[in-house]
Image: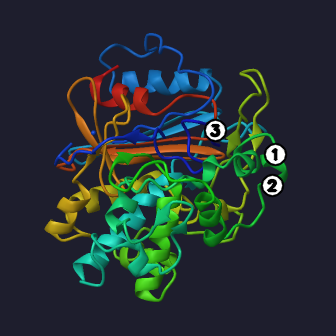
Amino acid sequence: MTCAVLGAMGGTVRRAVRGVVGRRLPAVLASLTLVGQAWAAAPAAPLPAGAPHAATRAAMAAVVRAGVPGVVARTRADGRVWGAASGTAALTAPGPPRQRGRFRIGSITKTFVATVVLQLEAEHRLRLSDPVERRLPGVVRGYGYDGRRITVRQLLNHTSGIFDYTDDPALRRRLSEREFPAHRFAVHTPSSLVATALAHRPLFAPGRGWSYSNTNYLLAGMVVERVTGHPYADEIERRVLRPLHLRATSLPGRSSALPRPMGRGYVRLPGEGGGSALHDVTALSPTAAGAAGEMISTTGDLDAFLRALLGGRLLPRRQLAEMLTTVDTHTKDAGRYGLGIGERTLSCGVTLWGHDGAVPGWMAAVGVTRDGRRSAVFVLDALGVVRGSRPLFEAEFCGG
């Protein structure tokens, strides 16, 4: 679940980059890189050259050949929705993956959390320039940290310099490596995970670099709770899920179960090799992710959420502009990152906004054009087998 380039609850390439970060609107979606096998080159599509979504079908088939049990796609173009599945929903019960099945979305949760924070700013209940110390007194202190110098904005765009708790060696072994099967039901608290992160020195001075850190969003969730007096999950439910009628999306809290309908989720642990067996981790404790990646959803709900967000249904114009103001991640594939959302430009010039997410059992990615006319959501039911979502987006939007 974690290594030098993968956050425990997924999201994007992790690399500490020192130096002054830039800002630009618009700008490129933080691309997730996974451990495990590299993508096999997609062979010629078995469908006729002119068949609709032929390249996407071929790319999905390549994912399955690489060892992922199943992959689901949902795309939209000018109001026309297309869905497809390849592989199987469960290794023990052959059958296609469910188009409307629920899955864990990992770091796509961050986009929901950032949306709520920006709604609170629109209500004048906080400012992005607020020091973290003002909102969470005494929480970010010691070992080189000073919450008076880190702002809420820097939490949301990963320029805080705060160490990612999933990179703690001992915790990483329990969350994503050889000890994970024995610890996947362990209960964690945000405060204990933050404390683990703060036991490591900062990666850089606030605002002087970029590094993806799940700790930032644990803290953002704590800020929401301190400002509103309610759990961040309740605020997401009230402010986003209910208004958009996202009935299949939920925040599980401490529940390890996945609501039906659903498939199974698998993980290949680092170091086991390409021929090793996949571990069924459908049920697990989401508390190791919290506001950094605990949510459950469907392809349809994620598509509806991102299109509503970019269409201005959730944020006033000024706050949406703030969300889409990006910083350079200084990594080849990650592009630029805004406030809980990223932007990536494909080889054919199509630019997508969205987020990737990875959690033991699933890898998911959503991308939407700025005008909302085209979108795609892809879900893989295994983690640690392939190296990212970009080939799927390239196939759908660029034809190969």
Q: Name the amino acid, label 2.
A: His
User: Residue 334: percent from the left, percent from the top?
Assistant: 37, 36
Disc 2 crowd rating (10 Å Cα; few below 14, some 14-19, many 20+) is: some
Residue 237: tell me if it is visible: no
Q: Residue at x 36, y 28 (%)?
A: 332
Residue 319: quadrant of the picture: bottom left
> Where is residue 113, by image quadrant?
bottom left
Q: Is residue 294 above or below residue 122?
A: above
Q: Is residue 389 visible?
A: yes
Disc 3 marks which amino acid? Ala
Badge 1 vs badge 2, beta-carbon distance below 8 Å: yes
Label 3: few (<14), some or many (≥20) within 10 Å? many
Outermost top residue: 44
**Image location of residue 347, percent across then percent down:** 27, 23
Assign a secondary structure to mark 2. helix
Mark 1, secondary structure of its residue: loop
| Three-letter amino acid code of the residue under disc 1 | Glu
Point out which mark residue 382 bears: 3
Task: Kindly report the distance in space between the C-alpha atoms of the residues bearing marks 3 and 1.
Answer: 18 Å
Q: Where's the N terminus, which quadrant?
A: top right
Q: Residue at x 32, y 54 (%)?
A: 207
Q: Position of residue 141 (x, y in %)?
A: 52, 70
**Residue at the spot of label 1:** 179
